[in-house]
């Protein structure tokens, strides 16, 4: 959608290559009309533009895929390992995902529910106590309408008020490094944490993690069989 090769052109090339069946997998784990659905629409636009017929099997979401949960749970453990054994009980885990306008979630979009389900599953797999983790949105758009919260910066202040000063941010809404991680968390959120007298750590994104890649492969195999 945002850079070449454009989805429509790739679909056109697939038609030229006589592809008849394909699996569509958007890397965003959680479905939303503002994200995954738009990618799927671009596939449909490509079929119309190039007058082709390919049977697409779209994977709408994979927010609860066992491999995804396993990979994120390992990231939680990696983040906690940055504190000595005797200090880890005081470290709080914050799971995050990109915010959406409140009107979208209020319309019945499953994004928010799926994000929270991912967080619960990862927390359970990582063995976190209920009070040992929390949820926050991040990277809200700069538009006049209200966006879903709590915002990460505001949530950090709430945690400080509760006496929590050591946190690990695990962005379960993202699977690879990009500006929402490298700037919004590593720069902006860390600066806010510094202002509040907190220590904020973020484990690496999943990127090419073998467990995560195998999870994606299994999703595709299950649809392509």
Image (cartoon, rainbow, N blue to C red):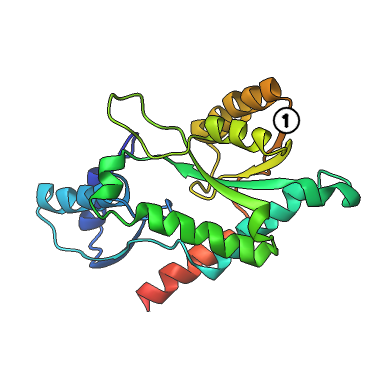
The residue at 26%/52% (across/down) is: 37
**Residue sitting at the far bottom:** 225
Residue 4 visible to the viewer: yes
**Residue sitting at the far front:** 162
> What secondary structure is marked by label 1?
loop
- State the quadrant of the C terminus: bottom left
**Is residue 171 found left or right of 32 in the rendered image?**
right
- State the quadrant of the N terminus: top left
Towards the viewer: 45 or 198: 198
User: In the rendering, at what x and y percent does residue 91 appear?
Assistant: 75, 46
Towards the viewer: 154 or 42: 154
Residue 213 visible to the viewer: no
Towards the viewer: 193 or 55: 193
Residue 103, quarter of the rendered image: top left
The residue at 48%/34% (across/down) is: 151
Indicate whether 127 appears above or below 174.
below
Circle 1 residue: 198
How many callouts does the rendering have?
Answer: 1
The residue at 58%/49% (across/down) is: 134
| Neighbours of disc 1 within 10 Å: few (<14), some (14-19), many (20+) | some
User: In the rendering, at what x and y percent does residue 184 appear?
Assistant: 53, 29
**Is residue 62 found left or right of 163 in the rendered image?**
left
User: In the rendering, at what x and y percent does residue 123 appear?
Assistant: 62, 60
**Is residue 16 found left or right of 223 in the rendered image?**
left
User: In the rendering, at what x and y percent does residue 198 appear?
Assistant: 72, 30
The residue at 55%/30% (across/down) is: 153
């Amino acid at each position: 959608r945002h850079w070449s090769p454009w989805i429509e052109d790739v679909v056109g090339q697939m038609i030229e290559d006589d592809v008849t069946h394909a699996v569509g997998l958007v890397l965003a784990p959680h479905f939303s009309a503002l994200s995954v659905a738009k990618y799927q629409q671009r596939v449909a636009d490509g079929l119309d533009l190039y007058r082709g017929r390919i049977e697409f099997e779209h994977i709408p979401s994979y927010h609860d895929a066992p491999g995804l949960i396993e990979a994120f749970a390992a990231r939680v453990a990696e983040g906690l390992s940055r504190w000595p054994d005797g200090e880890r009980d005081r470290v709080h885990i914050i799971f995050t995902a990109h915010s959406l306008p409140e009107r979208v979630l209020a319309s019945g979009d499953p994004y928010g529910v799926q994000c929270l389900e991912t967080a619960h599953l990862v927390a359970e797999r990582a063995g976190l106590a209920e009070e040992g983790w929390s949820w926050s949105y991040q990277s809200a758009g700069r538009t006049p309408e209200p966006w879903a919260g709590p915002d990460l910066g505001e949530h950090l202040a709430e945690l400080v008020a509760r006496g929590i000063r050591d946190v690990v941010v695990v962005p379960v809404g993202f699977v690879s490094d990009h500006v929402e991680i490298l700037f919004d968390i590593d720069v902006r959120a860390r600066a806010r944490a510094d202002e509040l007298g907190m220590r904020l750590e973020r484990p690496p994104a999943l990127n090419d993690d073998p467990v995560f890649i195998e999870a994606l492969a299994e999703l595709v195999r299950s649809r392509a069989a």
